[in-house]
Amino acid sequence: MTLLRSLCYQLLFLSWTLLTAVAFLPLLALATRRQMQTAAGWWLDGALLLQKYVLGLSYQVRGIENLPAGSALIAVKHQSAWETMVFHRLLADPAFVLKRELLSLPLIGWYLRKTGQIAIDRTAGVAALRRLLQEGRRAVAEGRRLVIFPEGHRQQPGHTGRYHSGVFKLYDALAIPAVPVALNSGLFWSRNAFLRHPGRITLAFLPPIAPGLDRAAFMQLLQERIESSTRQLENEAAGA
């Protein structure tokens, strides 16, 4: 049953994505960035409905009161593709820090540019950092919240990846609160796996980290909060 559900979801999701990508093409020329973000939310609503009714996969959000008013750096645990989508509904106008290769995707790359996402060439060294900070300052000036995955790559449940320093560079340069985010999506939607399992994903916004910490203190606190809360959510979902 899980295999059949996953297959149906994949076919319907790809069809829905292609349909909306073609239907929204005029918006690339006519819409503002915020209007394009609204359209992205409509696309996501369709994807979430497919997940709920085809996969039997829903989600719950905790700690929404921990989101500060105004700009913030949202530092998210990365276990699946699910969390790369859902923030279009959790945040009004998110600016994702993502790899530059995604801009080369047909259609999708055009929408990423239009919605003002922050694409970084990870091989560019100092130039990449300069662009990250420049685009981050621009997003903050626009009152947006930045979404970053500090580990860079998806991790299996129970695993901790290396937390990269780019998250601290943004925190330090922008002087905005950093909100750690824990989740257990990998239990239901594994990294690089075709099967998606029914259940309920939990995503938790944790208490924000105020600006002003040095690199060592910030990185340690961020990782401890995310990883300890992620393990708790994993254990909770497993019935431990």
Image (tube, rainbow, N blue to C red):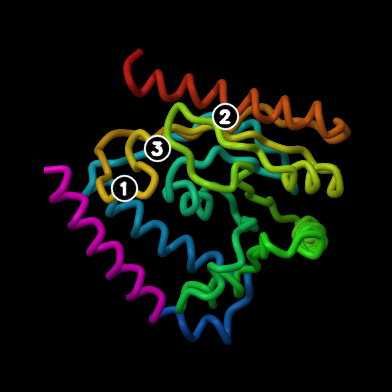
**Residue neighbourhood size for the residue with mark 2, other residues' Cα within 10 Å, grouped as few (<14), some (14–19), many (≥20):** few
Where does residue 111 sit, x and y in percent of width and height? 53, 73
Q: Say the numbered circle drawn on residue 240.
A: none
Quarter occupied by residue 198? top left
Amino acid under disc 3: Gly
Quarter placement of the N terminus: top left
Q: CA distance from mark 1 to mark 2?
A: 29 Å
The residue positioned 27% from the left and 51% from the top of the image is 194
Quarter placement of the C terminus: top left
In reply to whether residue 10 is colored magenta, the answer given is: yes
The residue identified by callout 2 is 63
The residue positioned 51% from the left and 26% from the top of the image is 230
Decide if residue 222 is on the left or right side of residue 62.
right
- Above or below, comparing residue 159 to residue 114 in the picture: above
Residue numbers of the magenta segment: 1-22
Where does residue 177 sit, x and y in percent of width and height? 77, 38
Decide if residue 194 is on the left or right side of residue 23.
left
Where does residue 133 sit, x and y in percent of width and height? 81, 57
Quarter occupied by residue 14? bottom left
Amino acid under disc 1: Ala
